[in-house]
Image: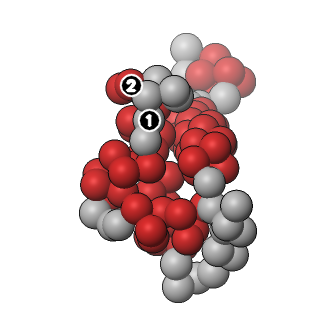
Amino acid sequence: MADPAPATENNEARRTQMLRAAAELICERGFSETRISDVAKRAGVSSAVVICHFGTRDRLLVDALRYAEDSFYEAAGRMLSEVPAVRDRLSLC
C-alpha cells in the first residue's frame, strides 16, 4: 500500500480538484461504485497521480467525504453570517 503524498502549497489545488471530483462521483454513483480511474478522468489527471496523492481508493473516498462535509459547513457558515441577528431584525419592525 502506497503512502499518500503530503499536502503542500504546490499540490493543494490539484488535491482539491481530485477531492471535488471524488465527492461528485460519490453523490452520483455511491461509495462502492466510485473508481480511482473515474475520479482521475473527471479531475483531468492520471490514476497514478490520484494514487500518489491519496495512496488508496479508500483513503481518497474518505478524504472526499471529509472535504464535502467541510465545504458544506463553510458554505452554511457564510450563509448564516449574512442573516441579520434576531435583535437587529426586531428593531426594524
Front residue (pair 30, 27): 30
- Secondary structure beneath label 1: loop
What is the C-alpha distance between the residues marked 2 and 1?
Answer: 6 Å
Reply above or below: 57 against 14.
above
Residue 13 in the image: state x and y as whole percent: 46, 71
Q: Is residue 81 left or right of residue 16?
A: right
Q: Residue at x 71, y 68 (%)?
A: 3
**Crowdedness near tag 2: few (<14), some (14–19) or many (≥20) residues, C-alpha within 10 Å:** few
Q: Residue at x 36, y 51 (%)?
A: 37
- Secondary structure beneath label 2: helix
The residue furthest bottom is 10
Residue 9 in the image: state x and y as whole percent: 58, 82
Q: Which residue is mark 1?
A: 34
Q: Which residue is mark 2?
A: 29
Residue 84 in the image: state x and y as whole percent: 59, 31
**In this rendering, does residue 67 appear at all?**
no
Front residue (pair 62, 58): 58
Q: Amino acid at mark 1?
A: Thr
Residue 71 in the image: state x and y as whole percent: 56, 44
Q: Quadrant of the C terminus?
A: top right
**Crowdedness near tag 1: few (<14), some (14–19) or many (≥20) residues, C-alpha within 10 Å:** some
Residue 29, by quadrant, is: top left
